[in-house]
Amino acid sequence: MAGSARRKLLLMGRSGSGKSSMRSIIFSNYSAFDTRRLGATIDVEHSHLRFLGNMTLNLWDCGGQDAYMDNYFSTQRDNIFRMVEALIFVFDVESKELRKDIETFVLCLRNLYEFSPTAKIFALVHKMDLVVVEKRQDVYRALMKSLEDTSAMFSFKVQGFATTIWDESLYKAWSSIVCTLIPNVTVFQRHLQTFADISEADEVILFEKTTFLVISHVTNVPSPGFRSDSTRFEKISNIIKQYKQSCSKLRAQFQSLSLRGSDCTAYLDTMTANTMIMVIMSNKTDSRGSTDLLGNSEANAEGDDSFAGEAENNIILANIKIARKMFEKIEMMNPDER
Amino acid sequence: MADFGGFPQILSLFYATFHPTEGTKVLYQVPPGSVVKSTDSSAFNVPLFDFESINSYIIPKPQLCNKLLTLRVNNYRIVSHPVHIWGSTYARNSFLFNFCFVFHKNADVSAYNPVVRKLSKMFQALEEQNKFLSSSLVNEGLKSIVDQIFEDLNNYCECFIPIDEANRINIKLFPLHRPPPHIKAFHVPISTVQLKAVMDVNWDPTMEKIVEFIDGINSVRKIAELADTDYGLTRKCIQHLMYYGCVIVVDIFQFSNSYACTPDISALAEDELIGEECQAYVASPGAKKRNVCDLLELYCSLHSGQTVREWYLANREQLRGIDIRRFISFGIIKGIIYRVNVFPVLEDNSVSAVDPTDKRLVRLTSKTKHFDDICTDLQISREQALRSLEKYGDVVLVLA
Amino acid sequence: MTMSADEMHDGHTAGPNPSPRIVMMGLRRGGKSSICQVMFHNMQPLDTLYIESTTAPTTSVFSSFIDFAVMELPGQINFTEAMIDAERIFSTCGALIYVIDSQDEYINSLANLHSIILHAVNANPNINIEVFIHKVDGLSEDFRLDAQRDITQRVTDELLDDGLVNVSISFHLTSIFDHSIYEAFSRVVQKLIPQLATLENLLNVLCQHSGIDKAFLFDIGSKIFVATDSSPMDIPTYEICTDFIDITVDMNNLYAVDRRPKTATRTDANTITGRADSSSNGVKPIPQGRPIGSTSRLSNGVILYLQQMVKGLALVCLMRKESMPKIALVEYNIEFFRDALEQLWLIG
């Protein structure tokens, strides 16, 4: 049996930059609207989150007030900066003291260099919704340039994201961050690819159940006309998260979702206790989609294949059931195995 | 009256709040420089303690707020009551503040606890009503209030500050005694001060009625009967008198009681003052004072197997000129003898009585009450009680 | 953009598909434009803060199942001279929505309403007056009920004073930040659909024979529900159905093949309804892929089932999980329901 990997994440940034709001949306099911009600974080808020069977995220949400920051870099230095797996530094795009924020960032890097030199560095340029659309790219690039230069001084590589709580960009950033921390993410990727190949699916996505962050995804066929929206993964996270909130109003959780769309069939179901899987197959009017379990072909009336996907659905369900055991084993794997 | 050495001095008083960008900061402190560095000319050179190390307990997480919080840091004890007010009108949806009192680490701060609590609640109300604390960053009014509380409490142990037309601070320090023990109906109060002399027209009417019956002989129940007052109220009055040290409470004196010495009997031998007091107190009116050795011998001759009657008969010669009741009372009050209680226990506990009084009797014995208690409760004599019990089987008498 | 008087009669536009007409009035900054934008143009509620004041009467023609037009009269107009014009409009209206800002002093608003009602009832005795007590998201629960009670009392009293007893008037508490605006609008529209009784009957029959607990017929674009079966309705159920529609549509659009020219905006109602643009009337829709449907299982044994119907309508049902094994039968029944709907609109 595996020991579980504990990952300490530092969430730092100036006061009011949006750290606690992000945390509550991703990990506590708040809606963006609800975050208005949050109060200031007093000192450090610790949260322990089980993420997959073999990983626990230890999130340190550090209050950004001056009094606390002074503490972090003096008396609490080794407590804060030791054994850090990842630093997530939040920059408020509206900040009037950007110079000071970057200095604080540098201080963090310096301390990490001393106490946790293998930590991964992430920078979130947050509250992008407050910037005019045309200027967003420039603002982001300008800030990232200085951050990349400063990180290089400590031989850190910083990865940046432009985020806002009002759209799906938040999910993209956090999915990427968490994925780098999953000990055996390549194993997931490999098995997901196999699953996709066997199911002849166009796209398969693996989500973590509570946060709905994307663990891994496989795209098999970039079919012509398939709307290749590169932000679709985080959009799905966002959509489903909202659905979860709606369901909770009825005091229930959703277990599965099957979509017979205009051009695709999608199926979202539980994979393991900690993950959900989404399988997307595009509608093809050739014979592929119409073979039922017994191997009989059904003639597809032109344009009227509303219910022809039923057999397909059942096959996907069966495949998921079989794959479940395998994925459960991967989750429980020793973090050091590959 | 409990020995009261005076209230401890407040070494420093400060007001801290949570600023949305700066975090916990001390806005006002008196004396200047005592908590954080100050540029004031009269300020301390070095603060009393390192504020930074404890700032997360001065403005703590919401779970610790709205409660009395006491910290020990170095040689100091800080008593505080942090307040957390939620409100969407505030930046970050909340307003946090704390008034803190700093004492020496060994000070007995029990008298200040209610004061700190009251101050916090009052400022909370002021803030909720008209944003008294949060409306301006520099609040001269608040600064002078803090100064004045510090001065007045240290010098006069009380403080009265009008804040505006509707609000004022009115604090007085009271010594906090331990709460009085429970008084039973069979206890007998003995006054230690001249109650009639201390009494005035403002006293409680029940109190006025019962005072004349507090003579060291009547039990609480008897007093209530004689004074024609409600038993519950009488008992409360006696408890109040006990709290302030005006009466002490002993058992009913009966010749059938037994007493025995406590280890403190040596106090009579060693302490001259007690000895003299004893001589004066126990002598019968008009009789000569006995010397302390005789009295000591008499006390030591009390033991648990013997009732007072038996003891008296055995020592009649030596007891000439001594008031027995006072002799026993003195011993009890000074703690040099103790009352041996008799607990009747039914051998067969599961017996069920038919008669209602008997039922109650059996129930009381099963709760291990001693005879005094039982008799006072049921208003019967000891013999009656014993006889009734023996109807139900063997009775064992336990002496303790 | 107003239609001429002779085109209209009986509160509906003339022509092969008579569309009910709704006029929206109220004092300025009451929220009329916000309501229209959120309901019919898919604007996010928070973005409505940036809408400018309406200066001229604006009509949103909403074409889906019944093509109704919502005409918004600006709040600043001079009432006396506009009244003459307005009377012409009232005579052709099925419903008058009056929007009151509940966060503001509403005495003036009520006085205005009263004079409007007088004119409206004069011009068209059959008109439905619907009062939206709007922006209630800022009020506490007790306050809302108080406001509703107060306004209802005042208005009905004034009408009684004037001897008007047969006015059909209803009051709704609304806010664009939750589902109440959709629900209120649904009720307004339902009163104007002549086919309502038939639809309800159809739904009842469907529910009885298919083990469906509750069924709604929604308009996908505006999330107004056109009809529901006779079983009791509660608001959380309605809300989750509207959310379910949103989710289904959003998910579908992520993977939908892009068939429209690149200039198309986010008004995705058109993609789903299958109409290339809103002006075509009675023309067979261009095939846009198969009709959308989705099913979701909830942990409390409830199944949500959505199936796109004709003309931008969708059937949303709630079933128990025990019905799932017989889903093929249910879908068979739904096919019949869809055929019935088609016939209903061909006749109508």
Image (spheres, helix red, strand yellow):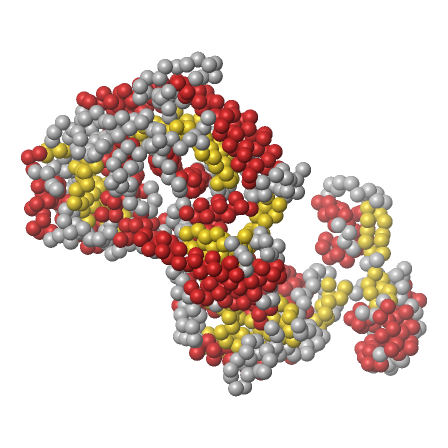
Relative placement, left or right, of B291 versus B57 is: right
Nearer to the camera, C335 or B67: C335
Is residue C242 positioned above or below B284 on the image?
above
> Is residue B86 something one can see in this rendering?
no
Q: Number of callouts in the render?
A: 0
Residue C217 on image: x %, y %: 30, 30
Is residue B181 positioned above or below C139 on the image?
below
Q: Quadrant of the C terminus of chain B?
A: bottom right
Residue C121 on image: x %, y %: 13, 41
The extreme bottom residue here reads B41
Q: Name the residue at 55% across, 28% down.
A: A323
Relative placement, left or right, of B220 versus C52 is: right
Q: Name the residue at 22% across, 23% down.
A: C344
Residue A21 on image: x %, y %: 45, 53
Residue B77 in which image quadrant: bottom right
> Is residue C287 something one can see in this rendering?
yes
Q: Name the residue at 12% across, 42% down.
A: C1
Relative placement, left or right, of C316 versus B256 is: left
Nearer to the camera, B33 or A163: A163
Q: Name the residue at 48% across, 37% down.
A: A217
Is residue A272 positioned above or below A108 on the image?
above
Residue A297 in which image quadrant: top left
Relative placement, left or right, of B333 versus C67 is: right
Residue A1 on image: x %, y %: 67, 37
Nearer to the camera, B61 or C86: B61
